[in-house]
Image (cartoon, rainbow, N blue to C red):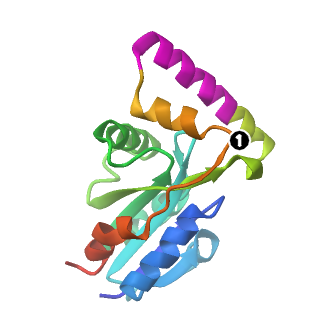
């Protein structure tokens, strides 16, 4: 199966996963700006990856703009974020955020995969630093009021640090899907 891997990466974790996926599948890897102009004909599978930032999905515009073409091929969406995708509550939260980010029904037929990335607070721009500080305060309040959650622990344990949870072996299910297995 011929695979195209499209990615949008701000800090590098999504790009790392995209390149690994390209190696695993023998697929072509394109950064989002290149992919917006790319011809999608001839591909059996298109995997679109992006980071999760403040409830948004970095590659959402690509999926929306190319929706008609993507309906003609096997399509995978992979998110990369700090939340642990082994925690069902985190996955539920990610999926509900994705449903809000897209028109109703658009994600039907698109297989979703969720991967854990990382963050280097030293590389964050001023806007994201402020957003993360507000998110940290929100998590602290939520933990005081409602008790600890996996998401809250993850944010509080990693806040202000350089953390990298990328794991090539986490790509196995996505790579198998792209190969049609």
Magenta segment includes 135: yes
* Magenta-colored span: 132-147
Viewer-proximal residue among 16 and 158: 158
- Quick one: label 1, few (<14), some, or many (20+) residues within 10 Å? some
The spot of residue 5 in percent (x, y) is 46, 76
The correct choice, above or below, for 116 with respect to 20 in the image is above
Q: Is residue 135 left or right of residue 73?
A: right
Residue located 52% across and 40% down the image:
55
Residue 40 visible? The answer is no
Name the secondary structure under disc 1.
helix
Q: Residue furthest top?
A: 145
Q: Is residue 130 left or right of residue 7?
A: right
Residue located 65% across and 59% down the image:
10
Examine the image and state in which quarter residue 22 appears: bottom left
Viewer-proximal residue among 78 and 24: 24
The spot of residue 168 in percent (x, y) is 43, 70
The spot of residue 128 in percent (x, y) is 71, 41
Q: Quadrant of the N terminus?
A: bottom left
Residue located 34% across and 78% down the image:
45
Residue located 43% across and 39% down the image:
97
The spot of residue 159 in percent (x, y) is 63, 37
Residue 25 visible? The answer is yes
Label 1, on which residue?
128
Q: Is residue 151 left or right of residue 37?
A: left
Magenta segment includes 131: no
């Amino acid at each position: 199966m011929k695979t195209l891997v499209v990615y949008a990466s701000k800090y590098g974790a999504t790009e790392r996963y995209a390149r690994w996926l390209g190696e695993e599948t023998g697929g072509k890897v394109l950064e989002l700006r290149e992919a917006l102009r790319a011809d999608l004909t001839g591909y059996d599978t298109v995997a679109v990856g992006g980071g999760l930032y403040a409830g948004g999905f970095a590659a959402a515009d690509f999926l929306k703009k190319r929706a008609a073409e993507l309906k003609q091929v096997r399509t995978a969406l992979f998110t990369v974020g700090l939340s642990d995708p082994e925690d069902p509550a985190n996955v539920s939260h990610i999926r509900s955020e994705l449903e809000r980010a897209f028109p109703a029904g658009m994600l039907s037929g698109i297989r979703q995969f969720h991967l854990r990335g990382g963050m280097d607070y030293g590389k964050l721009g001023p806007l994201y630093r402020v957003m993360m500080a507000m998110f940290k305060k929100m998590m602290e309040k939520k933990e005081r009021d409602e008790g600890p959650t996996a998401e809250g622990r993850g944010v509080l344990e990693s806040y202000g640090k350089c953390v990298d949870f990328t794991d090539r072996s986490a790509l196995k299910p996505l790579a198998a899907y792209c190969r049609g297995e």
